[in-house]
Image: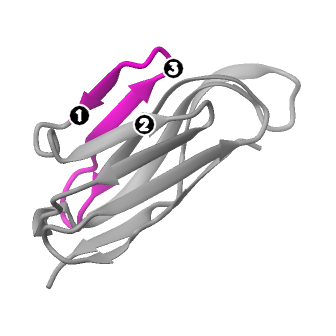
C-alpha cells in the first residue's frame, strides 16, 4: 500500500524556522508531484507548495520568499523560515503518480495524502 508520512511539525516562535519531511513508500512506478497543503481550523485546505519530478515548483503567495520545497525521488521537504502565527496549521503531504492499486497488480494515477503534522507558530 502506498503511504505518505509527514514529520517535523512542532511549536516554534514567530520568526523561527521549521523543516518538514515527507516520504512516500510502497509500490510506485513514478511520482509526478509531491507537495504540501495546510488546513487551519475553520479554513479550507490550501496549497502551500508543490514540486514536480521535472523540478518545477509552485508556491502560495502567502509563503513565497519564506518557504522552500525540495525533493528527492520519493521524499519532499518544506523548509519554513520567518514563520508567522498565520502559518499555524496542520500540514499535509501529498504524492501524485503511478501507484499500485491495493489488492491488484495494476497501477493507477493516484493522489495519496499523509496524516498531517501540526505546526504551531506562537509565543
Q: Looking at the picture, how far across and down is residue 112, in whole percent?
A: 57, 40
Residue 70, labelled with which disc?
2
83 to the left or right of 69 = left
101 to the left or right of 117 = right
Please give the name of the residue rendered at 48% of the width and 41% of the height, measured from the top-left corner: 94
Where are the magenta residues, as a range?
38-59
Quadrant holding the C terminus: bottom left
Quadrant holding the N terminus: top right
Tag 2, which secondary structure?
strand
Query: Which residue is farthest bottom?
Result: 123
Circle nearer the N terminus (2, 3): 3
Please give the name of the residue rendered at 86% of the width and 29% of the height, measured from the top-left corner: 104
Query: Which residue is farthest top?
Result: 54
How far apart are the alpha carbons under marks 2 and 1? 12 Å
Q: Is residue 104 above or below residue 38?
A: above
Q: Is residue 45 above or below residue 120?
A: above
How far apart are the alpha carbons under marks 3 and 1? 16 Å
Circle nearer the N terminus (2, 1): 1
Q: Is residue 29 above or below residue 34?
A: above
How far apart are the alpha carbons under marks 2 and 3? 10 Å
Q: Residues within 10 Å of mark 2 (few under 14, many from 20)?
A: some
Tag 1, which secondary structure?
strand
Circle nearer the N terminus (3, 1): 3
Label 3 sits on residue:
53
Q: Looking at the picture, how far across and down is residue 106, in whole percent?
A: 81, 20
Q: Looking at the picture, how far across and down is residue 121, in whole percent?
A: 21, 73
Label 1 sits on residue:
59
Amino acid at each position: 500500500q502506498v503511504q505518505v508520512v509527514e514529520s517535523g511539525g512542532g511549536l516554534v516562535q514567530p520568526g523561527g524556522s521549521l523543516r518538514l519531511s515527507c516520504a512516500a513508500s510502497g509500490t510506485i512506478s513514478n511520482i509526478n508531484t509531491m507537495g504540501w497543503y495546510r488546513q487551519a481550523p475553520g479554513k479550507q485546505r490550501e496549497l502551500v507548495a508543490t514540486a514536480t519530478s521535472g523540478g518545477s515548483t509552485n508556491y502560495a503567495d502567502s509563503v513565497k520568499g519564506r518557504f522552500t520545497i525540495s525533493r528527492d525521488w520519493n521524499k519532499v521537504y518544506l523548509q519554513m523560515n520567518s514563520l508567522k502565527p498565520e502559518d499555524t496549521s496542520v500540514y499535509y503531504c501529498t504524492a501524485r503518480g503511478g501507484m499500485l492499486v491495493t489488492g491488484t497488480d495494476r497501477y493507477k494515477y493516484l493522489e495519496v495524502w499523509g496524516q498531517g503534522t501540526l505546526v504551531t507558530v506562537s509565543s
